Amino acid sequence: MARDLNKVMLIGRLGQDPEIRYTQDGTSVATLSIATNSPVKRGDSWEEETEWHRVIAWRNLADVAGRYMNKGMLVYVEGRLKTRSWEDGEGRKRWTTEIIARNISMLGGRGQGNKDGMEENSFSGRETEPSEPRTLSRSQNNESEDDVPLYP
């Protein structure tokens, strides 16, 4: 009997500090922007090509990300792909694909440290996001309607 598999594994660097938000019931949600590099041959030379990944972490993973992770840190993320759609402010259908994190390991920071001087640590959490869409409160700044909305 065949089984389906939806699994993503990344090792990359955080492009910015994690953005932490909270649902109406107080559930923490972190959005991580992770860059991975791949060598690409262009002509006679090799160049690095960067791919950006949007990672969503829930509950204890979100709390750990907000407390210990910062821009430039090397991390390992394991999770699953989720694609969703919405209508923007002009009525156009938009799509995004995200990684819903199940496990995050901090492999080091710029150099070797991070916010609290921790060495490599791995954190796992239930990746279960709420089953019903909920409104999130923004903890840092206001975003325009054109920005990608978070999956609650």
Image (cartoon, rainbow, N blue to C red):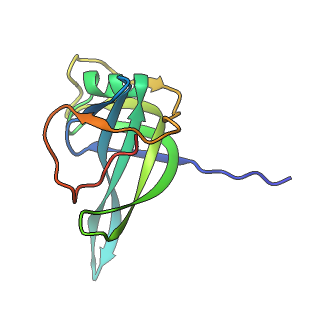
Q: Would you say 11 lies left or right of 80 here?
A: left
Check the image and report above or below for 26 versus 130.
above
Farthest residue, direction left:
141
Q: Would you say 17 lies left or right of 91 here?
A: left
- Residue occupying the point 42% across, 25% down: 59
Q: Nearer the viewer, residue 127 or 89?
A: 89
Farthest residue, direction right:
1
- Residue occupying the point 66% across, 51% down: 5
Position of residue 3 measured from the top left corner of the image (x, y, whole percent): 76, 51
Position of residue 131 measured from the top left corner of the image (x, y, whole percent): 53, 38
- Residue occupying the point 19% across, 31% down: 139
**For the image shown, how many numbered marks are present on the structure?**
0
Check the image and report above or below for 8 versus 26.
below
Check the image and report above or below for 5 versus 88.
above
Position of residue 99 measured from the top left corner of the image (x, y, whole percent): 44, 47
For the C terminus, which image quadrant?
top left
Position of residue 77 measured from the top left corner of the image (x, y, whole percent): 43, 39
Q: Nearer the viewer, residue 149 or 108?
A: 149
